[in-house]
Image (tube, rainbow, N blue to C red):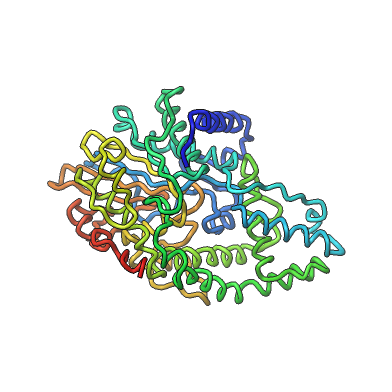
Amino acid sequence: MAYSSLTLLLLVFAGLLVVNAQAYASPKSKKCDSVNRGYQCDPSISHFWGQYSPYFSVPSEISADVPHGCSISFVQILSRHGARDPTASKTAQYNETVNEIHANVTSFKGAYAFLKTFEYTLGADQLSVFGQQAMINSGIKFYDRYKHLAEHVDPFVRTSGQERVVESAVNWTQGFYDAKGEKGHDLTPSVIIPEADGVNNTLNHVLCTAFEDGADSNIGDNAQGIWADIFVPPIQERLNKALPGANLTIDQTIDIMDLCPFETVANTQGKISEFCGLFSEDEWHQYGYYQTLGKYYGYGPGNPLGPTQGVGFVNELIARLTNSPINIQGSINATLDTNPATFPVDKKHKLFADFSHDNDMTGIFSALGLYNATRPLSNTTIETAQQAYGYSASWTVPFGARAYFEKLQCHAEKEELVRVIVNDRVQPLKQCGGDKLGRCTLDAFVKSLSFAKEGGHWASCFS
C-alpha cells in the first residue's frame, strides 16, 4: 500500500498529539512506561501477555552496555509496530462475546460487576495512542543509545506497508529526530514495501504457499488447542459460576482474557484494565504460555517452514553488515534490493531501521538461530522463558519489540565483532562461538547463517 504525503502528514500529526498526551500523564503512569525500561505496570501479569505485552526491558545475563574498549560502528534495528486495537476478525469476535454476556447473564456481582455496563469500543488494526507513544519512546532510546553515530548520520528507514507499521515507523522517526533536536525533520520512510498478494517482502510473510495454506499453517493452532484444553477449563468453570447464564466456551474464556491487554493498551496511559483483575497471576502465566506456543509452533522453530520465512531478511542483514551485494533468497524483492537508492549497502550507511510484525520477527529470529538452544516446547506443561533459554512470546515479540544488530570495533580484537540484543537481552550467540559478552566475529556470525544463505526450505513452499 502506498501512502500519500497527506496521509504521512496525518500520521505525523497523530504522533505529535501523543507527545502532548504524554505531557499530561500522571507521575504514576510515567513510572509505568519509560523510554528505557518500557511498560512496568503490574509486571507479574503484564509481562505475561505474550505478543500482547507492551514492550518492556527483558532481563539479561549479559550486560547490554557497550563493552569496555569497544565502539559501535553499525546498527540495524528490527522493530515490531506499537500496541494496537485487535485485528478486524478478533474485534468482531470480542464484541460478540461481550454482547452474549450482556444478553445471557442474570447477575453481575463483585469483581464482575463492571461487565454489566461495559461497552466494547475497540476499533480494528490501528495503533492506540499508547502504542504511538511507545514507538516515539523507542526512537528516543535508539538515538540516546547510539548517539555517537546518530549525531553524524541519519537512519535509513524501511517499513512494511500496513498502515500501523508505517505509522510506527513515522512515530519512531519522530522520536529519533526529537531526541536529536531536529524537530520538523522529514519523517517519511525511505522505503515502504507493499503488503499485497504476490509482492516479495522480507518484512511480511505472504508468498510461501505451503506455509500460508498447507498443513504447516495449523501447527501453532493445534499446539495452543492442546494447552487450552488443560489450562482453560478451571477458569471457564469459575467464570460461568460467577456469571450465571454466560455458558462461556473455552474460546470465549480466552476472549475475556484477551480483553485485559487490549483494553489496557487502549488507555492513553496504559492503565490496567478491570478485565485483568478477573484472573490470578498463575492464570496469566498460563495464558502467556498459550501465546508462546502459538508463536513457537506457528512461526518459529517448532514449524518446519517457520524459519524459512525469515531467510530473506537475514540475507539483507548479511549484505548490510558486510557491505556486499545481496544474496537473492526467499522473499527478497530483487527490484528494491539491487537498487542502491532503495537498498544501500555502502559503508556510509551505518544506521538502519526496519519495521515489521511479530510473526515475521519470529521467523527472522528463527532463521538467525537465536533460539537454537530452546528445545521443542511442551504443550502440556509450562516452560518459563528462563527454562526455554530466553524464549517466550512476551520476551521476543511484544508490542514495540525491537532487536539491535550491532557491529563493534574493539581495541583487543583484530576483527570486527557482532552482537544481537532483543528487547535489551543480549543473545549469547552460541551458534557462532559467542564470548562471555555475547560477541562473535563478523566472519563467524555470517558463517553461522548457512541456513539462510542457502535459502532455507524455500523450495518446499511451492511443492
Across and down, in percent, residue 361 comes to 41, 54
Taking the spot 78% from the left edge, 62% from the top edge, the residue there is 100
Residue 282 located left or right of residue 200: right
Outermost right residue: 106
- Looking at this view, is 59 or 460 the one in front? 460
Residue 374 showing in the rendered view: yes
Taking the spot 47% from the left edge, 42% from the top edge, the residue there is 1
Residue 256 located left or right of residue 410: right
Across and down, in percent, residue 6 comes to 52, 28
Taking the spot 45% from the left edge, 23% from the top edge, the residue there is 183
Residue 72 showing in the rendered view: no
- Looking at this view, is 211 or 123 the one in front? 211
Residue 215 located left or right of residue 130: left
Instruction: State how many labels appear.
Output: 0
Q: In which quarter of the image is the C terminus?
A: bottom left
Q: Is residue 17 above or below residue 36?
A: above
Across and down, in percent, residue 15 comes to 54, 32
Taking the spot 42% from the left edge, 52% from the top edge, the residue there is 204
Across and down, in percent, residue 315 comes to 27, 53
- Looking at this view, is 66 or 198 the one in front? 198
Residue 377's image quarter? bottom left
